[in-house]
Image: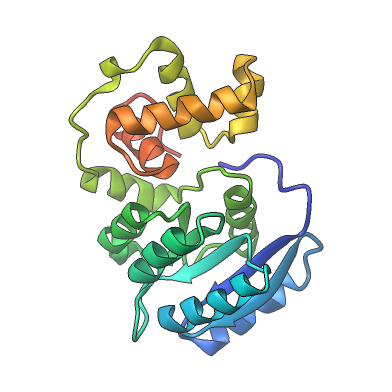
Amino acid sequence: MTGQPCERVIRVFLVDDHTVVRRGMRAFFDMLSDIDVIGEAADGQAALDELAVLDKADDLPDVVLMDLLMPRLDGVAATAAITRRHPTVRVVALTSFSEAERVHAALEAGAAGYLLKDAEADELAAAIRAACDGEVHLDPVVARKLTQLLVAPEETATALTAREREVLLLVARGASNREIADALMISERTARTHVSNVLAKLGLASRTQAALWAIREGLAPAP
């Protein structure tokens, strides 16, 4: 579920407690012209410390690629802290199939998307580009499991206006605010407002949760 990549080099920060994993990801990204790894950390606390330094230098990354199971401070807690302290930074969770509940917690904490650790390198890059563009990236295997864990909001789709239902479907397909605006022939600012209203009415915290909810309710096809 990706659209056009960002129209600039995407700055990425890697967080994983396995050195060989970080080296492998860095080696792959070094081959791409539109992704630049600007730093890395071995656990969530180290990541927060590094990001604080980068923030002071006005040098924050666009996307943090976050392992969820780490010592000291795990990926869920680190994601919550990053989205609170650095709201412009998008977090993409790295997970295994057995960690669906942990992924659910990461999404509640503000993660922009997730993918499996055994994903192909091209999918890894696609997830980062999607996050940078404000889109939702759902791994199909984990998405199906996550829809079973998602708590139903108090309101249902009937609480949405016809236009808001259209917006919800586009969000579920991974559309960015710009793409929603183009599809519905409205301004990007209006699209952003519609997305915010949909999340508020359904009591959801993120576009990713909205996409999962739409899939679970049968309003959108599974990826």
- For the point 42% across and 81% down, the residue is 45
200 vs 170, nearest the viewer: 200
Percent x, y for residue 136? 50, 44
Q: Going by the picture, which residue comes out furthest to the front?
A: 56
The answer to whether residue 170 shows anywhere in this view is no
Task: Judge left or right: residue 28 versus residue 201.
Answer: right
The quadrant where residue 82 appears: bottom left
Q: In the rendering, at what x and y percent does residue 29 appear?
A: 71, 70
- Identified at 21% across, 25% down, the residue is 155
- On the image, which quarter does residue 176 sit in? top right
Quarter of the image with the N terminus in it: top right
Task: Look at 47% across and 69% down and name the residue there.
Answer: 66
Task: From the viewer's side, name the closer residue of 34 and 195.
Answer: 195
Pick out the residue farthest to the right. 33
Please identify the residue farthest to the bottom as the structure is shown: 19
From the viewer's perspective, tell me whether residue 1 is left or right of residue 158.
Answer: right
| Horizontal and vertical percent position of residue 39 | 64, 78
Q: Residue 179 location, x and y as percent?
A: 64, 29
**Residue 208 makes an appearance in the image:** yes
The vertical placement of 161 against 65, above or below, is above
